[in-house]
Image (cartoon, rainbow, N blue to C red):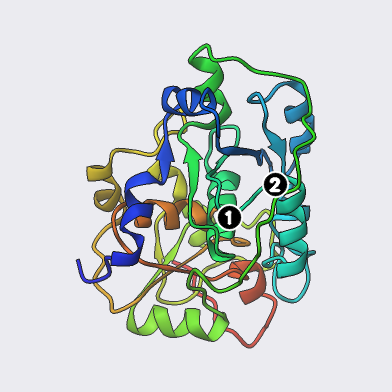
Amino acid sequence: MSQRSDRDSVLVSTLLVKPGELAAELAQDRPPVLLDVRWRLAGPPGIDSYRRGHLPGAVFADLDRDLAAPPGPAGRHPLPEPAAFQAAMRAAGVSRGRPVVVYDDGDAMSAARGWWTLRYFGHPDVRVLDGGYRAWAGAGLPVSTDEPGPAPGDFTAEAGQMPVLDAAGAQATARTGLLLDARAGERYRGETEPVDPVAGHIPGARNVPSTGLLTDDGRFVSDGALLDRIGAIDGPATGVYCGSGVTASVVLAALAMAGVDAALYPGSWSEWCSDPTRPVAKD
């Protein structure tokens, strides 16, 4: 597979952590930093879930505030500014020399966004709790309502450590490579659009709904099934987009686990459809 990235060999083998494995690591002298990034597009706020119960020692990170910049011309969830992201991560206790594990409720969307954003800004060791909070609690592992005050971290955000596309790059990838649309099929086909003002997809994109890469309980499907569900990777370059750059991160994580280096279009459909001169496909 030509797009396997040797520099990400460690990433591929360690992207996911199982609840039992994480519990053992948390019992060690230097446990990983835990980030609770639970989030729902239509609410309720993730902080409410965090306050009702979270992994012991976890710090809440808000997707809208910490993992994205305010909505605007660049889309509904543009990438955060390096200084803002660095400040948020340091306040959460994140340091470059200490592993980070991110988790959500179990749909992998916001956890994958947290994984990708930390990697984009240069953290070398970030993993996703497979199955999220549901898997942890379902395994009978302890939860807490205490809100820790971590010692400030020393993480330095250096943008550009993961590949990205702008609108022109996404269009070119759809023409000459492979551009994947991670949204639900009905949104891709333009049958409905509950969030953005225009329905449809970028011409030439292939639909790979992120939900198809997860089991019913929110875990990633087996390594052998990932590329079977994604389909043939047959272009010189691969890019992924969704509505606003969140759900696409699930597909990016799956591709990374399968050894495929792919780029995120952060603005995604929310940026693409804001320009009426850009073409829209419905099929």
Name above or below for residue 109 compared with residue 180.
Answer: above
Q: Position of residue 78 (x, y in %)?
A: 69, 67
Q: Which mark is residue 96?
A: 1
Image-based side of 236 in relation to 130, left or right: left
Residue furthest top in the image: 140
Q: Residue at x 48, y 51 (%)?
A: 125
Image quadrant in which the N terminus is located: bottom left
Badge 2 density bin: few <14, some 14–19, many ≥20, Cα 10 Å: few
Does the CB distance between marks 1 and 2 fall below 8 Å?
no
Q: Residue at x 72, y 63 (%)?
A: 76
The reply to whether residue 5 is in sight is: no
* Residue 211, quarter of picture: top left
Residue type at tag 2:
Leu
Label 1 crowd (10 A; few <14 / some 14-19 / many >=20): some
Residue kind at label 1, given as amino acid type: Arg
- Quadrant of the drawing holding the C terminus: bottom left
Q: Where does residue 230 sit, x and y in percent of width and height?
A: 32, 55
Secondary structure at badge 2 equals loop
Q: Position of residue 114 (x, y in %)?
A: 59, 51
Q: Which residue is mark 2?
A: 41
Q: Earlier in the sequence, mark 1 or mark 2?
A: 2
